[in-house]
Image: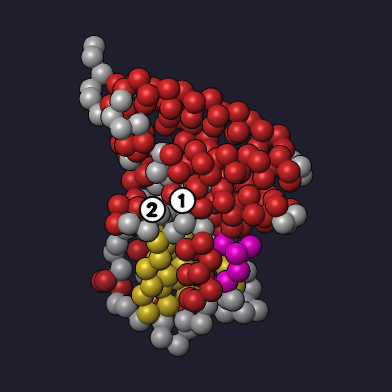
Amino acid sequence: MDAAEAQSRPRARLLASAGDSGWLADAARILRELGFVVDIDVGAPATDLAAEADLVLASAAAGVPSTLMHAWRTRGAVCAVVLPPGADAEAAAVRAPVTEAALLALLAGQHYVALSAREAAGIAPAIAAQTFGNPAFADELLQALVSSTRDDLAQLRHAGTDLETVRGVAHRLKASAHYVGCHALRRMAQRLEHAARDGDAATAAALTAIVAPTAARLLGLLASLPAADHSGHAAAK
């Protein structure tokens, strides 16, 4: 991962106390596989935590102020408390040990879209880079991406339990996301492709609940780009 990719990808902050950090390693590994850059704070004071985040997981013992969690939620972050094993579940909470299924359910339940504002801002430059600054070539690629993303989204929404269709759509969306520098979507689509290939219907359904709205977001962004923007110049009026 280069510096530009690391800068644009969604960030997850994992917050724990020194005596309640056993869930961190699994959570960090899963989130990295799903495309997040992961920052871990163990025993950090609250004054050090006011940083950008797309996902925040805080152990119940970490003592993160509710006002800070509210501030992250207001900025659009998915936030949850990590409870000890066997603890009664509550809204916006996951139990330790943290599993992929629990994290996917959390993300889908809070309507997470795996396309950050930073990645959205980089779509036009990514298309320009892919086409070497050639406006005609850029427009051809843009139209191809709009068409393929629209078709793939429609197929994904109607695929249901047809995992072979899901696998094919995920493979194509992975490629489209790569072309436009949307690394989180690429990683989610790749995980969806593997789940569908392996016949893991439950994981595929959970991932589809994230990938479909993300693809819809990408389609809207692509369709709204003025043609001349892909050459890096302002459109003539």
Residue at the image position 51 percent from the left and 52 percent from the top: 187
Quick one: SS at disc 2?
loop
Q: Would you call the spot at circle 2 few (<14 residues within 10 Å), some (14-19), or many (20 or more)?
A: many
Between 95 and 12, which is closer to the camera in this rendering?
A: 12
Residue at the image position 47 percent from the left and 63 percent from the top: 32
Q: Name the residue under label 1.
A: 184
At which x and y percent is residue 11?
A: 39, 59
Q: Would you call the spot at circle 1 few (<14 residues within 10 Å), some (14-19), or many (20 or more)?
A: many
At which x and y percent is residue 66?
A: 40, 66
At which x and y percent is residue 153?
A: 60, 34
Q: Earlier in the sequence, mark 2 or mark 1?
A: 2
Is residue 30 located in the magenta-colored stretch of the structure? no
- Residues at marks 2 and 1, CA–CA distance in whole angstroms: 6 Å
Q: In which quarter of the image is residue 13?
A: bottom left
Q: Is residue 106 above or below residue 173?
A: below
Amino acid at the residue labelled 2: Arg
Residue found at the very far top of the displayed protein: 237
Between 169 and 87, which is closer to the camera in this rendering?
A: 169
